[in-house]
Structure formats: C-alpha cells, structure tokens
Image: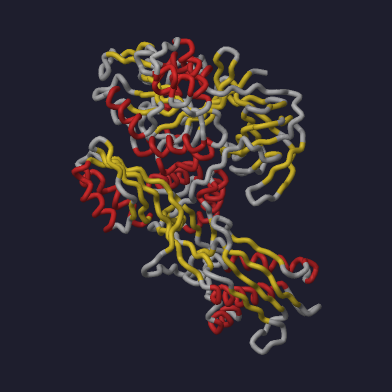
Amino acid sequence: MKNILNIGVLAHVDAGKTTLTEQILFKTGVINRAGSVDQGNTTTDSLDIERRRGITVKSAAVSFMLGELKFNLIDTPGHADFISEVEHSLSVLDGVILVISAVEGVQAQTRVLMQTLKEQGIPTILFINKLDRMGADYRKVCSMIRQRLSGNVCEMSVPSEEGTAWATVRPADPHEAGWLEILASNNEDMLRHYAHDIPVSTVRLQAELRQQTKNAAAYPLFAGSAARGIGIEPLLEALQSFLPVHTPVEDSADPLSGLAFKVMKQANGERLVYLRLFAGSIRKRERIPVVSKDGHTTYMKVKQLFCLMHGAIVPTDGVYAGDIAVLGGVDVKVGDVIGVVSDRMKSFRFERPPIQVKVSAMDSKDAPILHLALSDLTMEDPFLQYARDSRTQESFIHVFGKVQQEILLEIIREQYGIEAVFSAPKVICLEKPVSIGAAVERMGEPQNPFYATVGFRVEPGIDGSGLQYRLEVELGSLPLSFQKAIKDTVFEVLQEGLFGWSVTDIVVTLTHTGYASPVSTAKDFRSLTPLVLMKALNEAGTNVYEPVNKLQFIVPEFSLSKVLSSLAALEGTFEEPRFVNGIVHINGTIPVRTSDQLKAEVHALTSGEGLLTIRPGGHVRVRGNIPENSRKQVNPLHRGEYMLYLNNIM
C-alpha cells in the first residue's frame, strides 16, 4: 500500500483552479493532454452544464501518483452559491491549493475560503495563476495577499515577463525573499537569529517552512500559468513535502471511521457514495454501521467497493485509513458517519441557505418526476432541504442565490427531461420560545371531543439545538402507535409557530397522556396534539429571528462616509472601522434581505476600489415590525376554525 494525501483545489470563480487541476493530471500522466475550460473538455467538469458554462458546480475527485505517493485530488466549485459543496470537501482534506488570479488578485470568495482554512487549521499552498495574462501584476497581488489573507507568506517563485506569453518563473532565494522574518514569528530560536543577525542556512529555512506549512502556520506562495503549464513542476514537488502524508495500515485494529462527503447519481440511476476513511478499513462483502446526522444507526453490506486510481474509479477488495472509498448501491447521505466518529473529522458549521423558493413543474403531469429530481438532488446536497407539503402538494427548497437556482433548473431539464419553474425567493425567518409555557387537555372535559389526554411543556433550548422532544411520562403509558402519532404531530405543528415561521431551539416535553381502550385511535392524538401544543407555545411566547450575513468591507478612506451611510440605510451594523495604510477595514452584519442591494452598490460607493466579503452569519432577533409568514395549516389557536377543518367543513 502506498502513502496517501487528500488535497483540494479551491479558488474564487474564474481564477483557474480547474485548469490547474488539468495541468496536474497532465504532468502526472493521468491524461494525454490538458483539457480547456473554454473548450469544455476538462476531466473534472463532467456535467454538461459545467462544460457549457465553464464553471464547476459539483466537486469532483480524481487520483494521481507522484513517485510512491498517491494523491486524491478534489476540484471544488468557486462560486459562492455552491459553498455547501466546498464545505463537504473541506471536511475530508489533508491540504489545499488555493488559487489566486494574477490579474484580479484577492477576490471576495478567496477571503471566505482562506478564513475557513485558517479557522480549521488546514495546511494551504498558495498559487498565483495567469501570470501570462495581460494585466498580470505579481507584486500587487502579493501585497493584496499579505494585507487580506495572511502576512505569513513565503514567496517560492520569482516571475519575469509577466503579462506576456513569454512569462516564466524561477525558484526564489529564501534569504532574498525574507523567509527568516516570516518564519521567526512562529519559532523562538529563529526569532533570536533574526534579532541578532545570525545567519540561517537555506536548508534549515526550507525545513522550517515545510514544518510550519504542515502546521498551517505559514503559507508557501508559488506562481505560474496553469494554461501554459508554467510553474507546475515546483508546485508538484511542494505537494510531496509541505503537506501531511498518511501511511495506510492494512491490519490496523482501529475501529472503522469514515465520513460521506459526496453522493453522485450515475447515468444508470445508481448512486456512488464517496467516503474519506480516517481509521480502520472497508472490505467488500462486510457489514458496516452507518450513523445518520440524527444519531440513528443502521447496518449495510458492502456490495460494490471502488477506489480512486490513476484518474479512474476501479473495483477493489479493500480500502484503508487515509484513502477515499467509493461505495455503490447503498443508501448513504452526505454527512453520514461510517463506523464511529473520529476526532480527526473536521467540524464545519456553515449556516443553512436562508432563501426558500417554491418549485413547480411547468406541466402538472410531470410533478412525480419533479419530486424524484428534487429528492435525488437533496441526497447529493442536503442543504437544499427539500420539503413537500402533504396537503397542498407544493414543493419547496432552500438555496443560496440566483446562480444556484439557474443551475438547478438546467440540471432538472437535462437529467430528468422536464421543465421546472421557481417562485420569487423568500427570506426565511425563525421563531424561538421566550419563556416556559404549559397546557393540558384531559379526556372527558367539555371542550375536548377526543378520546385522548395530552399535556405539554415547552421551554427555550440552547442555541443551535433545534427541536428536542422529551417524555415525562412512561413510554409504556400509551401504545407505541399513539406515542408516534404525538411525536410526529409535534414536529409537524412546529413548522409554523405563532407568527407562521418554523420554531427552533425549543424543548417540548410530553407531560400528560391518557386513552380509553378500545375506542381511542391514533387520529384522536393527532387531532388533539396541535390544540394543546400551540396553547403551550402561546403561553411561552416566541420571538422572530431573521437571517443575517457577516460582512467584511475593505474600502478606500475617501469612500468611508458613503459606505457607512449605505450600511445604516440597509439596516446593517458595523464595528469601529480600522485604518491601515489609507485602507479602511469594516466588520459588521447586514440582513440577508438587503445584502443583494449592498453588493450592487459596492462599485459605485467605492469607485471600483472596494472589496466586500459576505458570509452567512446566523440569525438575529427582529426588533421592529415582526414579519409574519403565510400559514399553510389552519392555526390551532383559532379553535373554531380548526374544529371545522377537522370535520372537513373548511
């Protein structure tokens, strides 16, 4: 078995990461010629829509060899609308190549990606691409990298004739490039050498940079042109020595631990599930445990097992820790854990998409196909959060932005042969309980026409806990079918709180139960539960929270007043501005509902010199006019209407 490295290629859209991936595969002998994004013949952009649009939509995994070292390389989307694809990939990587354009420099998504890489401590190599393009400015981009990404950057290349077809690079001299000053910030011994002008050998500087890169404390910076194959060989050499390598152990006694990070539907309808193994091994025909995100464990038999090898997916009898396994014919979702959770699994808390759209088939007879398409797409990307209203038969998904919507419509058309349409997007708020509320209705009381007794207590849960359901009655106090009817109804009712929004961070405790055998039915409990639960929720009260984005704004000083005025008008908040060499750094938040307007104004506000970075920032309590969401269910607080609805009068 060979040593293994799992690496990713990340970038802002159009920086050239897919072209770089092609050059790496060409230089390592996986393909005979490097494909072109413009010509739509790249290896990792396999979808028709990716080839046509020239952007990466789905992450792709491919393998290559450098000597005895096996690399599994993942090419990820660059557009901000597909951040969930990037998240799934980052959770399984040992290191990353972050690509930056020599023309456009550090862009908004570059900063988002670098910030995440630093937060997660993922070793990262930087590559300034497109040195041969007109307008390339290596020095300017280096300055942007140090100002906006990290000051701990060691230059590995010296370019010449940039901006022309004759652009070349040569290795940088560590002393001339000032490595010692940079590396000294993370090494006390080197700091002493730097402070007292004690010479440090090139060999020692190189060894220290390798170690600090593996620790995600420093970042080697290479340069070249992926389209022309310039600067690729030094980058490949660096991959072998600057990133942490794994040595698989075939007979390891460690328990199996893996994470599903990608699900892909094949042309024949079967799904392939990509897993990163952190410990143990998977062998064909064995039974392995699968733990879903809600903690439920099932067991499955490995019928089809593949690994990545030299640009292809090939059958294998076993895959071992550190490698990527591909399973066929299994019901596994993105985010599921195979075996046990490992402390090496990186934990990401990207916010869910804050925008909801209704999806409809243009031809009503295609509704079943649309349901299949949305179910499949949600299997590949759980962030879509597809939901179908059982009463209205309406379908809803959550998205990040317009480009993602356009891509989804094209995928539905191309892969499923139907036309679909999206409604206008709606920003989705949340409700959270304010205090404790309780209610109970007992069988036989005048206002309770059902053969059932139900009581609930609701109270605030901790942030991020979602909906927790607990029992204060013995599990055996009711038949299991009645217990299930109550629990299922609780989750259904709390999709629409006092203001019509989904209720979260709430603890619901079942406090009272009762039934009369043999007349009580599950329907009695399904009918009574909404009345009691909403009464308890009404007593507790709820606050509404709207989604916000975190913003980082870099603007020239002359535009500061205009920027702050615009932020205030768009209901944004900001911290004290920070001034650095004529540039102002602004951190703050802005509601999702006004974020697009701010993006549209950036160029005018800053005369084209501003850089706005926006990331999902959770939810904040609405202080002014409380937005209400139109209800799909009859409100159980309106008892008369609710009873008429149950009796099919409304």
> At 36% across and 57% down in the image, what residue appears?
593
- Number of marks present in the image shown: 0
> At 68% across and 45% down in the image, what residue appears?
291
Would residue 275 be seen by someone viewing this image from the given angle?
yes
Residue at the outermost bottom position = 446
Up the image or down, 533 lies above or below 578; here it is below
- Name which quarter of the figure residue 524 lies in: bottom right
> At 63% across and 24% down in the image, what residue appears?
314
Residue 444: x percent and y percent?
72, 86
Up the image or down, 309 lies above or below 59; here it is above
- Name which quarter of the figure residue 582 lies in: top left
Q: Nearer the viewer, residue 471 or 573?
A: 573
Q: Is residue 171 left or right of residue 207?
A: left
Residue at the outermost front position = 196
Residue 92: x percent and y percent?
57, 34
Q: Is residue 293 left or right of residue 174?
A: right
Residue 570: x percent and y percent?
29, 57
Residue 159: x percent and y percent?
31, 15
Quarter holding the N terminus is: top right
Q: Is residue 84 left or right of residue 37?
A: right
| Colour approach in the figure | secondary structure
Q: Nearer the viewer, residue 596 or 393?
A: 596
Q: Nearer the viewer, residue 560 or 355?
A: 560
Up the image or down, 47 lies above or below 488; here it is above
> At 43% across and 27% down in the image, what residue appears?
18
Would residue 229 be seen by someone viewing this image from the given angle?
no
Q: Is residue 213 left or right of residue 532?
A: left
